[in-house]
Amino acid sequence: MTFHFDKDKNHFFTQNLLRWHASHHRPLPWKGEKNPYLVWLSEIILQQTRVEQGLPYFEKFKEKYPAVHDLARAPEDEVMKMWEGLGYYSRARNLHAAAKFIANELGGIFPNKYEDIRALKGVGDYTAAAIASFAFDLPHAVVDGNVYRVLSRYFGIEEPVDTTAGKKLFAKLAQELLDETQPGKYNQAIMDFGAGHCTPASPSCPDCPMQPHCEAFKQNKIAQLPVKSKKLERRQRFFNYLIFNQQESVFIKKRTEKDIWRNLYDFPLIETESLPEERNFVLKNKIWKLWLEKTEYRLLRVSAPFKQELTHQQIIARFWEIEVDGAFQPDETSWLKTERRNLKNFAFPKVVDLYFKQKFLPLELF
Ligand code: SF4
């Protein structure tokens, strides 16, 4: 699809957006912030996260690590624990790695050019533009899901937003619309407008300042825009967690493999093609048999399935609580024996935390 840039339509959009923002902006602790470290911290926390969810994390990170050196010096397990519950854990790993890079390689000075900001681990086009404009007033327009939605509707663009051509078109248009005299303000305005006014399911069209020129409104195409070419496919995975109880202790392990939840902790795990439905599964499984061969053990209980939705995967987990005697000493270097009361010091995936919260309720035993 060819799209023609129309100066008047663009001008109307930018002016009305800024006017709308002057009376609708939502005060948040990172808004107006010029310290690039704090801007960066807030932007990484807010990636794929709602403001309400990210807010307490921003506050506690800011308090614990007020400067980049503090974050760089922190042990990785501590950073992961601080991030627990926020999801997309690669963000925490990258944040920590980039803090070390800034502290050790750049003398603690945050980069002040777009390309150098973009080169930091975990920083993509969107985050680089946000940091560059908020902290340094550099003229780079942000483009994210909110921006795709607002622009595709206002301009009536049917080009899919998830193709190379579509991304290029929207990036060019977003840059044309940017008010270069106040890039930070403009970027904040379009993000707030997308998040709070032109929302996915119920945009506030009746009192929208864009309405006179909004193509989606005129053509009754709001629900069809933006267009996406690919449907998100979610793979189901079945996790069987073994919780070996040895008196007051249990065995946990760090996830070091290249998979979801890297550097978080969980329990010895057997992944299966489906969810086992027989109690004997635990005794029949070859690997478990090997581990339990020389041990007196008792299957205490089996949990109901717990679910966690990730962007591309759905995790369905069962927890098998097993009591083992003192002879149980698995030959697994990645396992760590810890007292139950110390489990709170480790960062676990959400599905394990859910189990911790609910396991005192009666659970299924088949
Ligand atoms: S009129 Fe409706 S669809 Fe168009 S920009 Fe405003 S809120 Fe969004």
Image: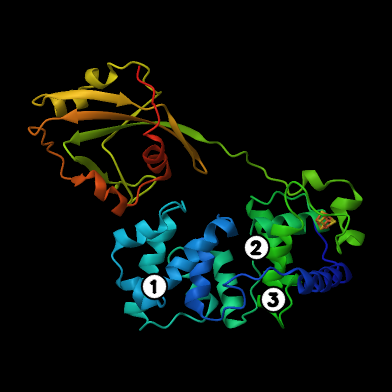
Q: Nearer the viewer, residue 335 or 8?
A: 335
Q: Are marks 2 and 3 in contact (CB under 8 Å)?
A: no
Tell me, for residue 65, which label it has, or none.
Answer: 1
| Residue lying at 72% horizontally and 83% vertically, measured from the top left | 181
The residue indicated by pointer 3 is: 185
Quarter, ligand 1? bottom right
Which label's residue is closer to the chain start, 2 or 3? 2
Tell me, for residue 362, which label it has, or none.
Answer: none
Rendering colour mode: rainbow
Which label's residue is closer to the chain start, 1 or 3? 1
- State the count of labels: 3
Percent of width and height locating residue 106: 37, 81
Is 67 placed left or right of 193 in the picture? left
Mark 2 vs mark 3, foreground winner is 3
**Disc 2: residue Cβ within 8 A of ligand 1's nearest atom:** no
Q: Are marks 1 and 2 in contact (CB under 8 Å)?
A: no
| Residue lying at 18% horizontally and 40% vertically, measured from the top left | 248
| Residue lying at 47% horizontally and 80% vertically, measured from the top left | 111
Percent of width and height locating residue 168: 66, 60
Q: In the picture, residue 28 is in which quadrant?
A: bottom right
Mark 1 vs mark 2, foreground winner is 1
Q: Is residue 120 visible?
A: no
Q: Nearer the viewer, residue 279 or 128?
A: 279
The residue indicated by pointer 2 is: 143
Q: Is residue 338 visible?
A: yes
